[in-house]
Image (tube, helix red, strand yellow):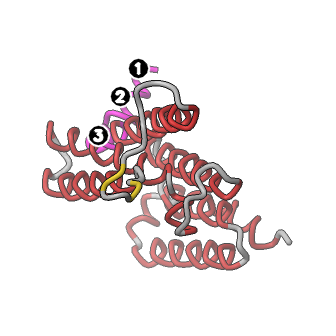
Amino acid sequence: MGDWWQRNIVEPGKLPLLIALTAFVLTFLITRVVTRLIRAGKGPFGNISAGGVHIHHVVPGVVLTVVGGFGAVASGGHGFGAAACAVVFGIGAGLLLDEFALVLHLDDVYWTEAGRKSVEAVVLTAALVGLVLVGFAPFGVNDLSDEELQDRGSVISTVVVNFLIALAVLSKGKIKLAVFGVIVPFVALFGLVRV
């Protein structure tokens, strides 16, 4: 386990991604607990308003995501700065995607059936980041041999074909299959031929 962890997770560049994913998932879970407590009228928490306007947690989420993202770019992806920016970005993304349905519908649908889209967006994001973290390369190019990787044309054509298939699946309204199809091309082909 230790050797696999060292080789696949802690290799250069992946630790900030692991930190961001951890902050993202923890923020989502904590935010869900706090919002349930607010709705039940329990605990020290309450809604935040400014000038009679309810401030949703998507607002600080956007700010933290922007700050963390630009900070990560500026830090170069290494050292304490990258880790700190990964935490800020993960927290911001967790707050933002927890209210994905609000952004999508431009309406406060948090506690409705439409509000489940937020949970789906968080689960989908966490799954995709987890796949990237453990070594899956988008578009299936991780299955190419060293000779094929040298041939840029085959890599580009593989990426373009897989992207077009995923785009066709997306046009059929199968969002989850299209997104996962970018990572695992067979999923996109399945979504394309399935009625």
Q: Which residue is mark 2?
A: 6
The picture places residue 19, in percent across and down from the top left corner, at 33, 36
The count of marks equals 3
Q: Amino acid at mark 2?
A: Gln
The picture places residue 134, in percent across and down from the top left corner, at 47, 41
Choose between 112 and 49: the one closer to the eye. Answer: 49
Q: Amino acid at mark 3?
A: Val
Q: Amino acid at mark 1?
A: Gly
Quadrant containing the C terminus is bottom right
Look at 61% across and 77% down and name the residue there: 167
Magenta segment range? 1-18
Image quadrant in which you'd find residue 16: top left
Q: Taking 107 as reference, is 30 left or right?
A: left
| Magenta part, dominant SS | helix
Q: Rate crowding at label 1 as few (under 14), some (14 to 19) or many (20 or more) other CA atoms within 10 Å.
A: few
> Do tag 1 and tag 2 residues touch (Cβ < 8 Å)?
yes
Q: Taking 173 as reference, is 103 left or right?
A: left
Q: Taking 137 as reference, is 59 left or right?
A: left
